Image (tube, rainbow, N blue to C red):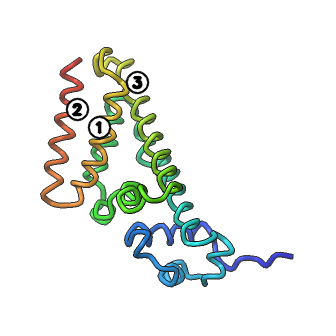
Amino acid sequence: MPRRKSFEPEIALEKAQSLFWEMGYDATSISALEKRMGINRFSIYETFGDKKALFLQCLETYSQDMKAGNLALLRNPGGLDGIRKFLTRMVEGPPAARRRGCFMMNSLVEISGRDADVSRIVDTHFRLVERSLRRAVDEAKSRGEVALGVATVDTARTLLALAHGALSLGRSDFGRPVARTAIQSVLDRLTREH
């Protein structure tokens, strides 16, 4: 009979994600994970696998959390208002969240190019964000909020780049006004074309 776990795997995974997000993959040791998660390395390996397997699970969880969180704005309220709220959240979130930036983008910068598994998860996540933005652009077009001639794919990709640029700039006092201006400029252009 398997032994019952003395910890909640979901909570331990959240704690691991928080540490990876703060420190990055390379700087996070198994000892630091043990301390943050409140479990020993045997329990980590038995429940999550090795450090890389745990990190991949953290990335997958992050993507699911974004789908239920920020990306949900692109469905509700959707359209141009959803796009505006989604982009604004990149700059106006709580200071602690802004300082950490995007876990997915941080991982892309740190190790995506040298690890095929991380690259796959990062690419899948960005495709999800792009699809969500495409739906919001199409909805804005159907509501008459932007011109029907606006190129959905190009606009969604522009908004994706803008969101991640705004999130990166939003980490500093100098960058937040720059990001706000860029967001407003792109949204104004979309509505002017209408």
Q: Secondary structure at mark 3?
A: helix
- Quadrant holding the C terminus: top left
The number of discs equals 3
| Residue 155 place in picture, x, y as percent | 31, 29
Q: Amino acid at mark 1?
A: Arg
Mark 3 / mark 1, whichever is N-terminal: 1
Q: Position of residue 22 (x, y in %)?
A: 37, 70
Q: Give the residue at mark 1.
A: 84
Q: Nearer the viewer, residue 35 or 153?
A: 153
Q: Where is mark 3, residue-wise?
A: 139
Instruction: Give the percent coordinates (x, y) of residue 61.
Output: 53, 57
Residue marked by disc 2? 187
Q: How far apart, in angstroms, are the residues tagged by discs 2 and 1? A: 8 Å
Q: Amino acid at mark 3?
A: Glu
Q: Are marks 2 and 1 in contact (CB under 8 Å)?
A: yes
Tell me the element at label 2: helix
In the rendered structure, the answer to whether residue 92 lies left or right of residue 135 reads left
